[in-house]
């Protein structure tokens, strides 16, 4: 099922095309026309639309710029739509509008969903939208990373399960490596921090402050510093209240209040108010006696020993030394000591933590080695099946002697995982480097497919690959140019048949000069020049019925009205329809 469909493209001032609209089928669209009519501009336009290199030579002579616009249907919640929306693009009724402009001076601009975006974003989206296979522009499966991913999908559950387990272990190993790196590279800093904490905690432990001790000592120091004045004041106050034994003529407050009480005592029974006052005077007498007693005790207990004052000041100095370093007061110093002890425990435990993490890392590396070996074995088995299937396809595409294979290799790395008895580099997808190889002729060594075939051969190889991978590779649109170069007859029919097969699960656009290929298309577009050599809007038409038979006749014999050619064209169409 095709989830993304390139519905149409509008091309203006690009090469021979003045202004044309290309309407595409969700299935197989064939683009035909006379040589030089501008068919290849369809491939060029699609390349520009998805981030290809902007060549000012493509701009039509006399025009200020060339413009390619495309409309791609997308699901609103898929990866392409989300990435476009992240860039500020908006969907238009379930479709994504893409535009690329190339000026005659070489400047290039890109728009996505009505927003100006970097050209690189179009290239990024192309990975999920289109694979272009032409003489000069190859994408998709030519990238080794996509070759490995496609091989993994082709392998199915044999790779999917181990790859998921490998990915989970790999991510955990990366996290462990980061933790160990942080712990080991900062070992000196942590050792210095631990030494400072130990020194501070030892200093605090030596002083052993108590909570609130600084407040108590401050009050005691204040009292001891004024002991004589306090004693004198207490003695004077006591004498005023209780009298002076050495001077009995001095009248004290206690005596005066007692006299007042006696004066009222004899008459209190005659007036309740006066009785109440007499009671209050009695209370005052008791209070005066208590205060006088406490003043006497205070004076007796007051410590005026200068040695005690010196001890208090020495203790306060020790506490002050702590508060200068570790907090505003003793409470803050004690809080620092508690936090410091916890941090020191954490730092002292780093060695144990490093040992634990190292053991876990070693176990994960062993697990990764096992999983990487499973992946390598599964990929090797799937690659053999794949090579046989593609080689069989090529035999029917006029490349009977071509052989396709996978090069699955690893790079030695002493710090890597063990695969096949060797230590090799590894990554998020395993330890395998995967590359698709082609030997186009007997006796030629296999080479990467991008280097091992001519343009036409490469398109056929990619067609064979795409047919084998149909349903496993997520690219929903394929465009082939020159896929039929140098072939004809039965091989051309097989190419058409395989393109139609690929179109059952994807959108396929083919620029072709072979009627055997075009006959298998769901839609055939004709590109025609006007008398002045340009392609206008009316120059790209959808062929149906009699018009399609006439175009196929022209492609077969160069004569649109040849009865023999017409009969052959109708036979080709009937054969194609019978295959569908």
Image: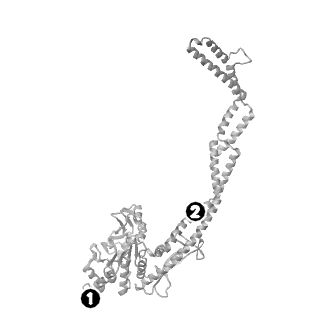
Label 1: element kind: helix
Residue 247 horizontal side relative to residue 554, left or right:
right
Q: Is residue 405 left or right of residue 23?
A: right
Seen in the picture, residue 304 relative to 157 is either above or below; the reply is above
> Looking at the image, which is closer to me, 120 or 367?
367
Return the residue nearer the eye: 374 or 197. 374
Answer with left or right where residue 94 lies relative to residue 376: left
Q: Looking at the picture, does residue 298 appear above or below residue 311?
A: above
Q: Which mark is residue 564?
A: 1
First of labels 1, 2 by sequence position: 2
Image-quadrant location for residue 482: bottom left
Q: Is residue 197 above or below residue 131?
A: above
**How far across and how far down the image is residue 38, in percent?**
33, 77
Residue 528: x %, y % from top left: 29, 77
Image quarter where the N terminus lies is bottom left
Q: Quadrant of residue 327?
A: top right
Q: Residue at x 66, y 39 (%)?
A: 213
Q: Nearer the viewer, residue 370 or 406?
A: 370
Separation of residues labelled 1 and 2 (CA atoms): 75 Å
Q: Which mark is residue 178?
A: 2
Residue 566: x, y in percent?
26, 85
């Amino acid at each position: 099922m095709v989830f993304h469909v390139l519905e149409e493209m509008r091309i203006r001032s690009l090469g021979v095309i003045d202004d044309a609209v290309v309407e595409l089928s969700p299935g197989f669209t064939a683009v035909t026309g006379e040589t030089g009519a501008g068919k290849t501009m369809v491939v060029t336009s699609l390349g520009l639309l998805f981030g290809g290199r902007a060549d000012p030579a493509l701009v039509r002579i006399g025009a200020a710029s060339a413009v390619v616009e495309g409309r791609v249907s997308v699901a609103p919640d898929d990866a392409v739509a989300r990435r476009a929306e992240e860039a500020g693009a908006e969907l238009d009724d379930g479709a994504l509008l893409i535009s690329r402009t190339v000026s005659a001076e070489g400047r290039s601009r890109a728009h996505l969903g009505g927003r100006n975006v970097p050209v690189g974003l179009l290239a990024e989206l192309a990975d999920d939208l289109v694979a272009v296979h032409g003489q000069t522009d190859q994408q998709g499966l030519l990238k080794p990373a996509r070759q490995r991913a496609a091989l993994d999908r082709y392998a199915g559950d044999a790779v999917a399960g181990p790859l998921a387990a490998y990915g989970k272990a790999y991510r955990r190993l990366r996290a462990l490596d980061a933790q160990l790196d942080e712990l080991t590279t900062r070992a000196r800093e942590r050792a210095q921090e631990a030494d400072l904490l130990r020194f501070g905690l030892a200093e605090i432990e030596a002083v052993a402050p108590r909570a609130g001790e600084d407040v108590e000592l401050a009050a005691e120091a204040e009292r001891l510093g004024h002991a004589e004045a306090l004693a004198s004041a207490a003695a004077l106050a006591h004498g005023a209240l209780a009298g002076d034994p050495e001077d009995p003529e001095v009248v004290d407050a206690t005596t005066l209040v007692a006299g007042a009480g006696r004066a009222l005592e004899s008459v209190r029974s005659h007036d309740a108010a006066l009785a109440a006052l007499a009671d209050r005077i009695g209370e005052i007498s008791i209070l005066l006696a208590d205060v006088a007693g406490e003043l006497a005790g205070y004076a007796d207990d007051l410590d005026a020993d200068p040695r005690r004052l010196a001890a208090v000041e020495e203790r306060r100095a020790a506490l002050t030394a702590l508060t200068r370093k570790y907090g505003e007061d003793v409470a803050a110093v004690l809080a620092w000591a508690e936090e410091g002890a916890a941090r020191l425990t954490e730092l002292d435990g780093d060695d144990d933590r490093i040992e634990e993490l190292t053991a876990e890392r070693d176990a994960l590396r062993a697990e990764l080695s096992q999983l990487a070996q499973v992946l390598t074995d599964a990929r090797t088995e799937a690659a053999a099946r794949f090579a046989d299937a593609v080689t069989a396809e090529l035999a029917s595409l006029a490349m009977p002697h071509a052989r396709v294979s996978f090069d699955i290799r690893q790079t030695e790395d002493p710090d890597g995982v063990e695969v096949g008895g060797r230590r090799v580099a590894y990554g998020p997808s395993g330890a395998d480097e995967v590359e698709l190889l082609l030997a186009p002729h007997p006796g030629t060594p296999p080479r990467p497919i991008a280097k091992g075939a001519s343009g036409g051969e490469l398109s056929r190889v990619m067609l064979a690959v795409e047919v084998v991978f149909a349903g496993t590779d997520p690219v929903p649109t394929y465009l082939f140019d020159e896929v039929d170069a140098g072939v004809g007859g039965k091989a051309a029919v097989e190419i058409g048949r395989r393109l139609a097969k690929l179109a059952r699960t994807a959108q396929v656009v083919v620029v072709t000069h072979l009627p055997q290929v075009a006959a298998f298309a769901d839609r055939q577009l004709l590109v025609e020049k006007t008398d002045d050599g340009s392609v206008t809007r009316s120059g790209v038409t959808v062929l149906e019925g009699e018009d399609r038979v006439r175009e196929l006749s022209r492609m077969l014999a160069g004569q649109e009205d040849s009865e023999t050619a017409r009969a052959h064209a109708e036979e080709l169409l009937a054969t194609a329809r019978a295959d569908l």
